[in-house]
Image (cartoon, rainbow, N blue to C red):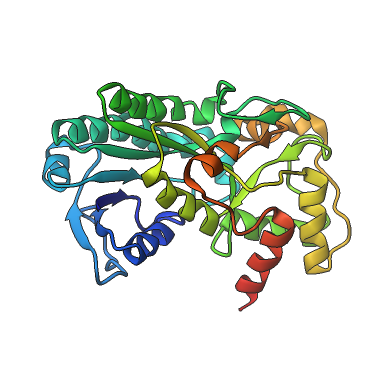
Amino acid sequence: MKVLVTGATGVIGRRVVPLLLAQGHEVTVAVRRNRRRPIPWGDVQAKLVDLFDPATLAPALGDQDAVINLATHMPPSSARMLVRRAWRENDRIRREGSRNLVQAALASDVPRLVQESFAPAYPDRGEEWIDESVPLEPEVYNRTILDAEASARRFGDAGRIGVIVRFAAFYGPDSYPLRDFLQALRLGWAPMPGSPHGFISSVSHDDAAAAVVAALRARAGAYNVADDEPVRREVYAGTLATLIGARPPRFPPAWITPLFGVARALARSQRISNRKLRDETGWRPRYPSVREGLAATLREMAA
């Protein structure tokens, strides 16, 4: 299969490309005109693409069997994530970039699209499991995921295969939020808004990348990408604290949460099910929960 990947050098994209190559796919990566670093894979094609310039998209899509859109622009630090304006470029990518990419893919007769999305946009459901039938309720800072998903559905409505992968909270050895989290734990704090008893659903970078590749054989629709066992926040923070030899952390006071859009979203209790993706594709996370995954991640960071 010939596959074009946008966002190929991001934390998920740079894991997806080697997996695609290992399965024998012909991979083309979309690169920006001002990119300075060389592409780290010798067996891929690189094509100049600007998601905001439709004229650059058609030449890249002409002979592709699938497009994987992982393009995002995350704020550069955990602190900046709390600032609404730090998400503007990401909003534009999800709103305008995804729309332009879908329009070009439709014009180029590309049969399949995989679009990234964000599972923590689900509402707070307390102890209940959340599957893909639950409507998203994003906060202001991530409302444009609705635009990106609408573009993917428009692709499907045109008779193509539009697949949406809704990622749970990421972690991995190259995650700066995780590094910031570890630093806070050493100071005695768990930087997690919401009740310590609420659920958090996570997925490792590597498991998320494997899910993206598995989505190439999925039927059209939305799929949650999360580990098998969501844990309560107190378990997540306590697991990490134990692994680094820190004392049990304190959690932020409840009055802080309403001050920030990101915090309001992260304060939700979300017990997200990955059953649909597992049943559809046979994908299984390497790490059933953060208990196993965080321990492996810290070992990799130390190495």
Q: How many marks?
A: 0
Q: Nearer the viewer, residue 183 or 11?
A: 11
Res 22 quadrant in image: bottom left
Residue under the point 19% across and 31% down: 106
Q: Is residue 189 visible?
A: no
Residue 137 appears left or right of 11: right
Residue under the point 72% across and 25% down: 125
| Residue 247 position in % (x across, y down) | 88, 61
| Residue 111 position in % (x across, y down) | 24, 37
Q: Residue furthest bottom?
A: 303
Residue under the point 56% across and 23% down: 133
Q: Nearer the viewer, residue 73 or 205?
A: 205
**Quarter holding the C terminus?**
bottom right
Residue 4 appears left or right of 276: left
Residue under the point 83% across and 36% down: 253
Q: Nearer the viewer, residue 73 or 40?
A: 40
| Residue 228 position in % (x across, y down) | 66, 47
Position of residue 128 relative to residue 246, above or below, is above
